[in-house]
Amino acid sequence: MKREKILKKIKKSSWDIVIIGGGATGLGCSVDAASRGYKTLLLEQVDFAKGTSSRSTKLVHGGVRYLQQGDVSLVFEALKERGLMFKNAPHLVTNQSFVIPTYDWWGGPFYTVGLKVYDLMAGKLGLGPSKHLSLEEAIKALPTVEQDGLKGGVIYQDGQFDDSRMAISLAQTCIDYGGTVLNYCKVTKLVKDGELISGVVAVDQESGEEMKIQAKVVINATGVFADEIIQMDEPEKKDMITPSQGIHLILDKEFLPNNYAIMVPHTSDGRVMFAVPWHNHVVVGTTDTLVKNHSLEPVALESEVDFVLETAGQYLVKQPTRKDVLSVFAGLRPLAKPDGEKKATKEISRGHKILISVSGLITIIGGKWTTYRKMAEDTIEKAIMLGGLPERECVTRHLPVHGYRMDIDPYNDPLAPYGLEKEEVIALGEEEDAWSGWLSEKLQILKSQVVWAVQKELARTVEDVLARRTRALFLDARESIRIAPEVAQLMAKELNRDEKWIADQIQVYKAVAKNYYFED
């Protein structure tokens, strides 16, 4: 995972498949292509999962809401993929019990029947049966739930994971199978041989060096930025993406002390809302707000924050306020624009679309984290045909993700995402005094995780470490700012950087982090 070696390899090779974009979809494509034996290169303009793919509700789910909307085929597909994610990445994905509290006499029977259908659709890959809860059982599961008017509840099983750690593990899986991935390398131009795409021009964002890279097939998997790549190919092309913003608030565990999550099936704006235990905190969200402009650092709107706090307060005994929010983060969903009539963003299907231009650019849009593997399989099937590549079967249905380990608890063990490498991360802390002990005992982050992130996971900035290699920024923004100077010091030694780099990194990180908490 040495950047210099990767850059050398990129310059002297030609590729079967070049993938633009290092989020869930692009990384899924890289794993699929590399595991079939194709010469695979993935380029990401900033850091892996920097955008949407690190900002999810942390759920691996079929989507109860999509069932309600009648999108049965998507639910079938997502439930199947949920089951495969559990089997392929047990160190990253865990079973989570969700409770729907019911306040109407008809709510219990209505949701019980709906979730039985959900269970049946999961088939052999189900996680356990849903069942009705009495008033006493509902209160026992959710002691902090609003009890005034509570009739009971329904409990069902779904999945939970750590999104950006999954992304890093997929990047490592691609490398395990001979693929090449690189962050901070931006594609600025598509290269054509006549009318057909034959490669890309990419700029190393650290050195400014420009590289011309040959490829038989180019895949655009850039999420909300997909239109920019499409327009490099066809400047007049209309936008294909409708960006929708969703925000999440992080609260202390006291708001949901047991290990059960809450699912609110119908908020005042017609969405579902979740309060889910995650890394000893609680994730509450989300919203669905149409936005005109996309950005690498979307910011939560005041109205969105108020809505989430107000809705959470309707279901929790203690009304959360802005003072209780440890971190707030926003993400943009790259929804495929619906054909024909205008729809509210919450009604746009989360299914994916694969577009192929006349010049041969393959663009994959839409989709969701749970279906990343199927999206990749569908995309690479098209790439094989388009690039005249030798036909080889997809093997990712039963392909263990890097670090695969059964005897580990992703729910309670903060080092679980490292899987088989957990002990190596701990042992690294014993090699040097500067690497030993806690970086943040509050967030259960070791100093050795910083060094590991630089040595083994291509972390290049303080933000890479605090936002995505660990989840400090997303769990407690103020605590992440407190430990940022020590992270910068540890990284500078590994990357051979000077005091100016350290000062700049701290300043840049603070500027990013200020959007993740509310001023007192």
Image (cartoon, helix red, strand yellow):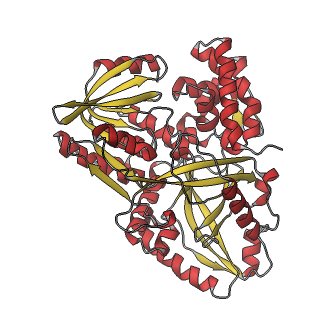
Work out whether 273 lies above or below 485: below
Q: Picture quarter containing residue 140?
A: bottom right
Residue 418 vs residue 367: left or right? right
Choose between 299 and 279: the one closer to the eye.
299
Most extreme residue toward the front is: 236
Quarter of the image containing the C terminus? top right
Residue 279 vs residue 333: left or right? right
Residue 352: x percent and y percent? Answer: 37, 56
Residue 340: x percent and y percent? Answer: 35, 67
Q: Picture quarter containing residue 488?
A: top right
Work out whether 507 lies above or below 314: above
Choose between 485 and 280: the one closer to the eye.
485
Residue 493: x percent and y percent? Answer: 63, 14
Residue 502: x percent and y percent? Answer: 67, 18
Work out whether 11 lies above or below 473: above
Work out whether 236 lies above or below 422: below
Please tell me how many numbered marks the rendered image carries: 0
Can the viewer see residue 181?
no
Can the viewer see residue 384?
yes
Kindly identify the residue that appears in the image at 45 percent across and 43 percent down: 401
Kindly identify the residue that appears in the image at 58 percent across and 79 percent down: 111
